[in-house]
C-alpha cells in the first residue's frame, strides 16, 4: 500500500510541475502577466529565505539559523563571494548549535 | 544587447558561467545533504530502502516527500498523505509557469525539465536571469541536476545508515540554504520598489506560516507582485 502512496504522490507532484511549464506562452506575454513575472523573482527569493530562516513546519522559531543568516548578511555587506557567504552561515549555525550542546 | 526581451550586460560567457555554476553547486550540496535526513526518517517511518529511494527519484520534491512520510509514519491514510504531499508541491506549478519563457523547452526536454522544477533550481535560474536567458537556463539545469544527484545519493545513504550519520543541522546546513537565497536576491535589491517587494513577500510568507500547510506560504507571497502591479498600474503608465 505504501507503493500506492509513493506513485500517487509522484504522479501528482509531476503533473503540477509539468502543468506550469505548459502554460501557453501567449498568456505569459500579456503585459500585466509579464509585469507580475518581472517582480516575481525578488518576491519568491525573499519569501523562501524568510521561511527557511524562521519556519519549522507550521511554527515560527528563532534558533541557530538566525545567527548563521545574520553573519551571512554581514558577509554580503562586506562583498564576500557567494561561497564564503554560504560557508560562514553554515559554520556559524553549527557553532551556535555546538555551544548550545 | 537584448535576448528574448531580457537586457543583458556585455560580459564574456566564461565570466557569466562561473558564478552561476558556483551557486548551483553550493545550493546543490546544502540541499542535497538533506536527503540523509529524509532517507533516515523514511526508513524509521516504515518505508523500505527501495521505497525511500523510489520516492526521492520519482517525486523529487523535498517538502512533499517529508510530508508524505510524516503522514504515513503517523498512521495516516494513503489518500491524506498523498493529498498533503501534492498540495505542498503546488508552488512548483507557479515556478514552472514563471520558468516557461526563459527555459523555452518543448517535447522530451520539457518532460525532463518539469521533473527538476523545485525551489532551488527556480531560485538560481531567476537570480541568474538578469545576466541573460542563457545564464538562467544554465542556473536551472545545473542546480536541478546537482540537487537531483546529491539528493538521491544521500537518500540512499541515509536510508541504509539510518540515524547513525547525524543531522545536517549539526553542520549548519539549514542556515546555508536561506543564506544562499539571500545572496541570490541581494544583487536585485537596488531600488526602493524591489526592497518593498522583498520585505512584503517575506512578511506575507512568515505571517501565514502558522495558519497554512508548509509550502503554501511561498505561494501566497507571490500575491505581493500581483497586488503591486494591480495597485500601481496607473502610476507606471
Image (cartoon, coloured by chain):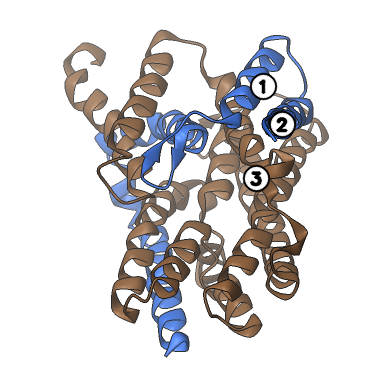
Chain colours: A blue, B brown
Tell which subunit mark 1 falls on: A
- The label number, if any, that marks residue A72 in the structure image: 1
Look at discs 2 and 3 and give the one toward the viewer. 2
Residue B174: percent from the left, percent from the top?
A: 62, 41
> Is residue B20 placed above or below B195 in the rendered structure?
below
Tell which subunit mark 2 falls on: A
Say which quadrant the N terminus of chain B sits in: top right
Drawn side of residue A11 relative to residue B84, left or right: right
From mark 2 to mark 3, how far is it between C-alphas? 17 Å
B235 and B231: which one is in front? B231
> Is residue B73 placed above or below A77 in the rendered structure?
below
Kind of element beneath mark 3: helix
Residue positioned most to the front: A101
- The label number, if any, that marks residue B139 in the structure image: 3
Residue B80: percent from the left, percent from the top?
A: 29, 73
Residue denoted by label 2: A86
From mark 3 to mark 1, how far is it between C-alphas? 22 Å
Residue A34: percent from the left, percent from the top?
A: 34, 36
Kind of element beneath mark 2: helix
A72 and B41: which one is in front? B41
Tell which subunit mark 3 falls on: B
Q: Are there few (<14), some (14-19), or many (20+) residues within 10 Å of tag 3?
A: many
Residue B201: name its quadrant: top left
Specify whether residue B158 is in view. Answer: yes
Drawn side of residue A55 relative to residue B35, left or right: left
The reply to the same-chain question for discs 3 and 1 is: no
Q: Are there few (<14), some (14-19), or many (20+) residues within 10 Å of tag 1?
A: many
Specify whether residue A35 is in view. Answer: no
The reply to the same-chain question for discs 1 and 2 is: yes
Q: Are there few (<14), some (14-19), or many (20+) residues within 10 Å of tag 2?
A: many
Amino acid at each position: 500500500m505504501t507503493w500506492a502512496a509513493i506513485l500517487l504522490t509522484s504522479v501528482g507532484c509531476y503533473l503540477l510541475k509539468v502543468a506550469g511549464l505548459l502554460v501557453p506562452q501567449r498568456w505569459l506575454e500579456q503585459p500585466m502577466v509579464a509585469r507580475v513575472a518581472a517582480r516575481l523573482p525578488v518576491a519568491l527569493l525573499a519569501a523562501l529565505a524568510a521561511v527557511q530562516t524562521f519556519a519549522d513546519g507550521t511554527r515560527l522559531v528563532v534558533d541557530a539559523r538566525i545567527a548563521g543568516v545574520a553573519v551571512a548578511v554581514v558577509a554580503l555587506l562586506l562583498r564576500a563571494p557567494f561561497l564564503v557567504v554560504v560557508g560562514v552561515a553554515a559554520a556559524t549555525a553549527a557553532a551556535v548549535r555546538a555551544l548550545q550542546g | 544587447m537584448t535576448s528574448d526581451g531580457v537586457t543583458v550586460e556585455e560580459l564574456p560567457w566564461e565570466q557569466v558561467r562561473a558564478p552561476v555554476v558556483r551557486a548551483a553547486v553550493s545550493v546543490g550540496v546544502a540541499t542535497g545533504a538533506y536527503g540523509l535526513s529524509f532517507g533516515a526518517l523514511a526508513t524509521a517511518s516504515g518505508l523500505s530502502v527501495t521505497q525511500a529511494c523510489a520516492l526521492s527519484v520519482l517525486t523529487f520534491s523535498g517538502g512533499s516527500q517529508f510530508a508524505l512520510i510524516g503522514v504515513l509514519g503517523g498512521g495516516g491514510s494513503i489518500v491524506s498523505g498523498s493529498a498533503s504531499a501534492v498540495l505542498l508541491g503546488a508552488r512548483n506549478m507557479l515556478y514552472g509557469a514563471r520558468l516557461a519563457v526563459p527555459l523555452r523547452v518543448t517535447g522530451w526536454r520539457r518532460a525532463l525539465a518539469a521533473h527538476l522544477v523545485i525551489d532551488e533550481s527556480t531560485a538560481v535560474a531567476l537570480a541568474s536571469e538578469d545576466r541573460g536567458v542563457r545564464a538562467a537556463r544554465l542556473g536551472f539545469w545545473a542546480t536541478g541536476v546537482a540537487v537531483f544527484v546529491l539528493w538521491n545519493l544521500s537518500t540512499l545513504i541515509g536510508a541504509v545508515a539510518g540515524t547513525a550519520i547525524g543531522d545536517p543541522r549539526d553542520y549548519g546546513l539549514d542556515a546555508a540554504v536561506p543564506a544562499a537565497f539571500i545572496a541570490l536576491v541581494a544583487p536585485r535589491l537596488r531600488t526602493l520598489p524591489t526592497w518593498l517587494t522583498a520585505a512584503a513577500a517575506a512578511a506575507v510568507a512568515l505571517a501565514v506560516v502558522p495558519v497554512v500547510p508548509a509550502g503554501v506560504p511561498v505561494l501566497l507571497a507571490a500575491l505581493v507582485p500581483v497586488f503591486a502591479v494591480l495597485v500601481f498600474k496607473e502610476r507606471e503608465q
